[in-house]
Amino acid sequence: MPNQRCDWIMKEQITGSDWRGRRAGRLVGALGLLLALVLLIGVVPAYAQDDEFPPQLPHYFTGTVSTSTGPVPEGTVVEAFLDGVKKVDTAVNAQSGYELLVTGEYGDEGKIVSFTVAGVQASQTAAWVSGELDYNFDLTIAALPNGSWFPFPFPFECFIATAAYGTDTAEEINILREFRDVVLLPSDLGAEFVSLYYEISPPIAEVISRHDILRTAVRVGFVDPVVATLDWSYALWSERD
């Protein structure tokens, strides 16, 4: 009999522990559900209360870029426009490929995304869709501007000067751009120089942008003197035909 009583007591203890465990589990689950409801009620309707809508995901495009005679050169700039408004640009890689994330807002669904290649309108367009992934969206144009081999639309970034000044909107950079467009690009030798600069300067600019001391040294020791010289001689070269 004592053994049976001990067995009964142990069974009751085990049964009680299981019941308490299940009760605790149900309590935790209920608290979790309550917290989820609080977050759902408190966060999601905030958009509706403020007459706002959840942010839209970008529309992703990727593919190749080519003309009627073949792939475009590395560095050719591709721009994307949503309903006529520029959203983003990128440079074509060595395989003539590109990637673009075109952002939009609520209400932009179905609006037209168009593209330019080196400033030339591409033949392809697409309807903007939030979160859409368009792989192998190849872009084509008849030819690069004026039939030229030169792949860059203008104005194009002055990589080293931008890194030195920490911005691409500095007045000094505008002077460099104007000298490039007015003096260098109209001549074959100048265009070749600019093309070489765009080929080798991006990695140099990346190193400069990472070090404040180097950025200051390049700006004070190199870019500033060049800009000062161009500014001083502006009247001589700015009126060239």
Image (cartoon, grey):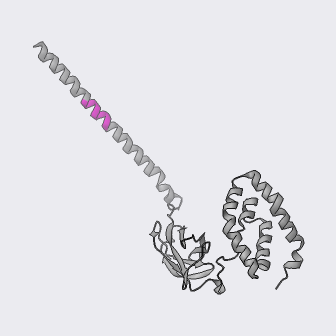
The reply to whether the magenta stretch includes residue 48 is no
Q: Position of residue 125 (x, y in %)?
A: 51, 79
Q: Position of residue 203 (x, y in %)?
A: 66, 61
The quarter of the rendered structure image containing the N terminus is top left
Would you identify the image quadrant in which residue 155 lies? bottom right
Decide: is 6 above or below 199: above
Decide: is 107 above or below 120: above
The quarter of the rendered structure image containing the C terminus is bottom right
Residue reaching furthest to the left: 1
| Residue found at x 63% / y 79% | 119
Viewed as shown, does residue 179 lie left or right of 106?
A: right
| Residue found at x 15% / y 20% | 7
| Residue found at x 83% / y 58% | 220
- Range covered by the magenta-colored residues: 18-25
Viewed as shown, does residue 24 lie left or right of 85?
A: left
- Number of numbered discs on residues: 0
Would you identify the image quadrant in which residue 103 lies? bottom right
Q: Nearer the viewer, residue 77 or 74?
A: 74
* Magenta segment main secondary structure: helix
* Viewer can see residue 156: no
Q: Position of residue 17 (x, y in %)?
A: 26, 27
Q: Nearer the viewer, residue 140 or 95?
A: 95
| Residue found at x 72% / y 77% | 192
* Viewer can see residue 129: yes
Q: Position of residue 73 (x, y in %)?
A: 60, 76
Decide: is 204 above or below 148: above
Q: Nearer the viewer, residue 163 or 71?
A: 71
